[in-house]
Image: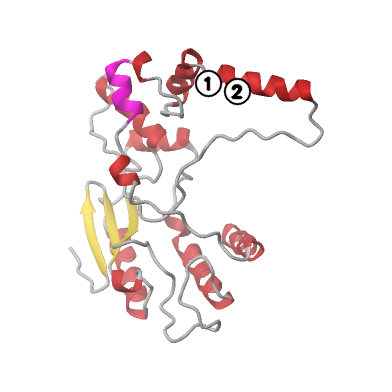
Amino acid sequence: MPTYDTLLYEKQRHGVLITWNRPETLNAISRQMEHELSDALREAERDPEIRAIVMTGMGRAFSSGYDIGGERPDGKPFNPYNLTDAELEETKKLLIAQKKLLMTRYQDYDSLDRLMRQGAVWAAPEFSETYRHLTVLRKEGKLDFDLQHVLKPKEGGLGWVDTWMISADADSERVELAHNWVNELLQKENYVRVVRSTGYGGTVDVRDLLTADENELYFMNRSAEAAQLHMFDQPSSPEKWERIWSDVEAS
């Protein structure tokens, strides 16, 4: 198995985990890391046993971008959510270089479900819905491999909260109707159907209406892990990011 100064290369089942290992710089991409990453990807591509490549970063950030060294033009410390034009351009190059590693968007749960059942994908971010579905199949004896759901919060959103908004021209009758609908949805006997159909714990405590197996599946205890999470900044220059994503998609 190859060894690198700036990366950790670990084969696992039919995949390889590549960890960017410069935590003292928030895994900023140096020239050496860039060369080693290229070598590691070629090594994985040559290995007939490897079907998937997963990348992660050592420490509290995946990467802070390119290690450009010296003081930034604005005199401020590096912030991955407020990039200069030069840094954005380098980010685009890196995204384009990694496009060939992507098999599916994680939001496409049906495709992810099929790929994981076939063994084509062995790791995915934010796959809780697929994890719960495959866990049920495993208990029913329809899968021949074990699953693990790992939560490693470093930086990101604290989660989605359902929101209902009322437009400016809504009259009192419609507002009352909307409130009544929300109140009806949040009744435990109704919300338990939401939990069972979507596979999410939700925002209503319906544990007394679920079986022991369902409680274990839908209400995993993750308080200690979630306590490590902190909210990220808003990305700068949304219009520039739109241009970059268009270039990446067109590449």
Q: Is residue 56 visible?
A: yes
Residue at horizontal 42%, vertical 38%?
112
Q: CA distance from mark 2 to mark 1?
A: 6 Å
Q: Secondary structure at mark 2?
A: helix
Residue 52: x and y, percent? 33, 50
Give amino acid for label 1: Leu
Residue 224 painted magenta:
no
- 113 vs 234, nearest the viewer: 234
Residue 213 painted magenta:
yes
Residue at horizontal 23%, vertical 33%?
145
Query: Which residue matches tag 2?
Result: 182
Can you tell which quarter of the image residue 242 is in? bottom right
Give amino acid for label 2: Val
Secondary structure mostly seen in the magenta stretch: helix
Badge 2 vs badge 1, beta-carbon distance below 8 Å: yes
Q: Is residue 251 above or below residue 107?
A: below
In the visual, does 140 lie left or right of 73?
left
User: What span is colored magenta in the figure?
Assistant: 211-219
Residue at horizontal 52%, vertical 74%?
87
Query: Which residue matches tag 1?
Result: 186
